[in-house]
Image (cartoon, rainbow, N blue to C red):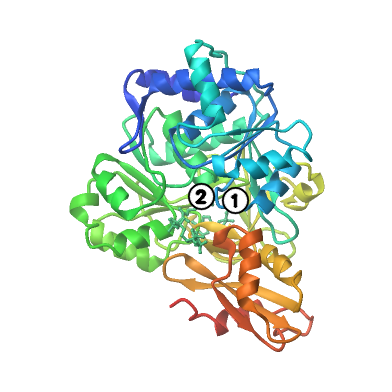
Amino acid sequence: MHNVFALIQSNLRRQGEQIVLTIPKGPKLSGIDLDSQSAILAAVLHDLGVEPGDRVSVQIEKGQMNVVLYLAVLRSGAVYLPLNSAYTNTEIEYFLTDAEPKLHVCSIDRAGHAERLKNRLVGLEVLTLDGESGTLFDLFVAAKLAKNSLEAISPRAADDLASIIYTSGTTGKPKGAMITHNNLISNAAMLTEAWAYSIDDTLLHALPLFHVHGLFVALNLALINGGRVIMLPKFDLDAVLSVIRDVTIMMGVPTYYTRLLADPRFNKDIGGHMRLFISGSAPLLVETSDEFFDRIGQRILERYGMTETGMSCSNPLRGERRAGSVGPPLPGVEVRIVGEDETKLPKGEIGSLEVKGDHVFKGYWKLPERTAAEFNDEWFVTGDMAVLSEDGYISIVGREKDLIISGGLNIYPKEIEDVLNDQEGVVESAVVGVPHSDFGEGIVAVLVGEGALDTGALEVVCREKLAGFKVPRRWIQLEVLPRNTMGKVQKNLLRDEYADSFS
Ligand code: MCA
Ligand code: AMP
């Protein structure tokens, strides 16, 4: 049985009547509750005609029903396709057209747009879920009353898809990363070993449930080990501080840690008992790591991964956690650093980071050529620049890809530039990320116009077409963009020039 849900179920059953999932001021679900509720929802999915391999796209607020839906989709053998709740209707239309889900589950305020999409996307079913309301929730309640539940777990092969998660790219539109059951099982096994994750752990879950970090690194790892989860709807300082004494592990993006450190209530008394603080998705500054160590008496464990690979490297649980490094490769992961001629470089030299292992995804949905382009033989090309130390620690030192990471969210400048370049009066644009004290990087748009540009109007267009976190926060108009002799825009000069935009 390769269905990752089987692994989760066996550990939910180990917990039995014990509470596994707690939402403060909200419901508490035991292992048995999660198992039985996912069986009820699986029956609903079955009655709706969702078959193994069908995509179920989900754009809803975080909550316990989100977890139950995720488990029901896995247990049905369908493919879970989570979508950022900040995505605009324009963005959603693209994802649904590309992924052709059988069922789209959205919050009630998004239903109108999704219903209209049904005219174009033949066979699409749309249901709503908002906490404990919505048409899918009604079906769930009716199935529960009728004692309709699907206990069987759909058998899956190791390389059958468990999930598709869209990631943007330096060229063109976002691509759906196809993640298999074996990818999830193998990555969870690596992390369990590396972090000694166990049924005795309680995880503070404040991350969104629509990215690899919150869904697979955090939630899956906890559930696969039978551990308890205290789940917050989002990262909120007061809420985090009010539950932190009850947990043993916290996972977050660097912004979570800088926000905690900015609050004097966060000290050794409240955080010193923790078994592990883990950071990833974006570089953790050495200053943050050191300040945290001084304040709490332990070092944040930094790890590194990608949507396409899950986690590849991690600082050790025992042994030196090195600030500024993401540690050695995880057990079962191979890494190499290659030069421009694509051959392996010696230790100490900076090059392109490539990874190999069972955790590497199956490819991009419907894009075999793009998939092939991202592999160097059987090595996946991460697009990150890295260096390997003599004692086997990897440090990420930059990116080959033109990518901004803001508050742990990836933003590809090309996507914003495409929107801006389409607007009347805009001759060209260059979008860059510069240091931001809260988000790590903030977005600056540099424009060349036919005349004076109305940047307020451009912001409105961006807000209409792009999720809020992708909207530039500073606007600059220039006569020309700086270019090198090859004609390429010199974004490094723009980054230097506007480096103080958010300080
Ligand atoms: C929200 N806003 C942002 C961001 N988040 N702006 C820039 N960067 C962001 N990350 C904007 C909104 O558009 C809005 O502005 C305003 O901030 C308030 O929104 P709100 O949601 O209330 O903000 P927040 O609660 O302060 O959220 C910030 C956050 C959150 C807590 C840092 O973004 C977050 O939880 N990030 C984690 C993302 C994550 O899980 N990344 C993992 C992906 P306006 O109203 O003007 O629009 S990477 C991954 O999975 C790989 C595999 C890995 O390695 O982990
Ligand atoms: P995503 O495509 O959303 O999965 O983001 C993956 C990218 O986030 C990686 O390719 C890196 O550029 C970045 N990333 C993740 N973790 C770290 C980290 N610990 N340090 C630096 N960059 C990171």
Q: 10 Å neighbourhood of mark 1: few (<14), some, or many (≥20)? A: some
Residue type at the position of mark 1: Val
Q: x, y percentage for residue 365?
A: 74, 42
Nearest-to-viewer mark from 1 and 2:
2
The reply, left or right, for residue 208 in relation to residue 471 is left
* Ligand 2 location (quadrant): bottom right
Q: Are marks 1 and 2 in contact (CB under 8 Å)?
A: yes
Residue found at the far bottom of this picture: 479
Kindly identify the residue that appears in the image at 45 percent across and 31 percent down: 132
**Residue at the (38%, 36%) spot, across then down:** 197
Residue 459 quadrant: bottom right
Figure check: 355 above or below 343? above
Picture coordinates of residue 13, whole percent (x, y): 41, 18
Q: Amino acid at mark 2?
A: Cys
Residue at 56 percent of width and 60 percent of height:
468
The alpha-carbon separation of the residues under discs 1 and 2 comes to 9 Å
Residue 70 showing in the rendered view? yes
* Extreme residue toward the top, this view: 147
Looking at the image, residue 135 lies above or below residue 187: above
Quarter of the figure with residue 50 = top right
Q: Which residue is mark 1?
A: 335
Given the current orientation, which residue lies at the most extreme right position?
A: 369
Considering the numbered disc 1 on the image, is that residue within a helix, a strand or a loop?
Answer: strand
For disc 2, the neighbor class at 10 Å (few under 14, some 14 to 19, many from 20) is many
